[in-house]
Amino acid sequence: MKYGPYNKSSKAKLSDGITEEVYVGLNKENYNNSDLFELSIALNNNSNEYLTEAVVMTQKSGDNFVLTATWAKDFKAIITEDGVYTYKWEYKSSSEGKIQVKFTVLNYDEEIKTTGFIELDKEAKDATTVRYLWACNIKASYGIDIYTQLPNIDTQGIENPDTSDNILFYVIISLLSLLGLIFIINKIKSI
């Protein structure tokens, strides 16, 4: 088992609702069958100590990746394509005063699967802030690809309009420069 990157910078509070996302690169060529890693978001209690967490495991299974969640027994998301996926956790208080958590995996704006909100057996009054987002229990020699921002172009080849606009701009500028150069050369020849 290897430990991976973690982040303790979140200032989100359960009283306001917590939404945390991380972007994970999944490439089948990088993993052997049964390789796995876990990502977890933990909460602190009122004394700034560990209270609870929501762990999501990603495991290579045949030609797919399978995501499961420790608190959501019926949740199983199957990722069939290589890409960078959004792992999104949401925490809130239930009307009964318990902590609820929801995990959703997305491919850009497309929701692949969600657990829906599931109530944990912890009191919301005891929870305050995010303790950490942590990549742990990595059992894959490749490791894990974590991104702080969603890349502009995904691996399925979806074109990014910003990128294509920039390329078009440079092509037009290059053509105009070439035409200007041809004009100058013709003027010099005529002298």
Image (cartoon, rainbow, N blue to C red):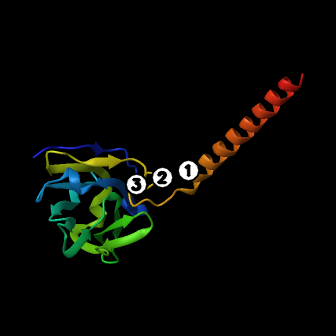
Which corner quadrant of the image does residue 35 belong to? bottom left
Dot 3 falls on a residue whose secondary structure is: loop
**Residue 144 appears in the rendering:** yes
Dot 1 falls on a residue whose secondary structure is: helix
Q: Position of residue 179 (x, y in %)?
A: 76, 38
Q: Position of residue 112 (x, y in %)?
A: 34, 72
Which corner quadrant of the image does residue 23 belong to? bottom left
Residue 12 bears which disc, if any?
A: 3
Residue farthest to the right, as pictured: 191
Amino acid type assigned to the residue bearing label 2 in the image:
Asn
Structural distance between the alpha carbons of marks 1 and 3 = 33 Å
Q: Nearer the viewer, residue 109 or 166?
A: 166
* Residue at x 23%, y 49% (from the top left corner): 135
Q: Which residue is mark 2?
A: 152
Residue 82 bears which disc, if any?
A: none
Q: Position of residue 126 (x, y in %)?
A: 27, 61
Q: Is residue 107 above or below residue 7?
A: below
Dot 2 falls on a residue whose secondary structure is: loop
- Residue 16 shown left or right of residue 118 in the figure: right
- Residue 189 shown left or right of residue 67 in the figure: right
* Residue at x 29%, y 59% (from the top left corner): 127
Mark 1 residue crowding within 10 angstroms, few (<14) / some (14–19) / many (20+): few
Structural distance between the alpha carbons of marks 2 and 3 = 26 Å
Amino acid type assigned to the residue bearing label 1 in the image:
Thr
Q: Quadrant of the C terminus?
A: top right
Query: Disc 1 or 2, which lies upstream in sequence?
Result: 2
Q: Which residue is mark 1?
A: 163
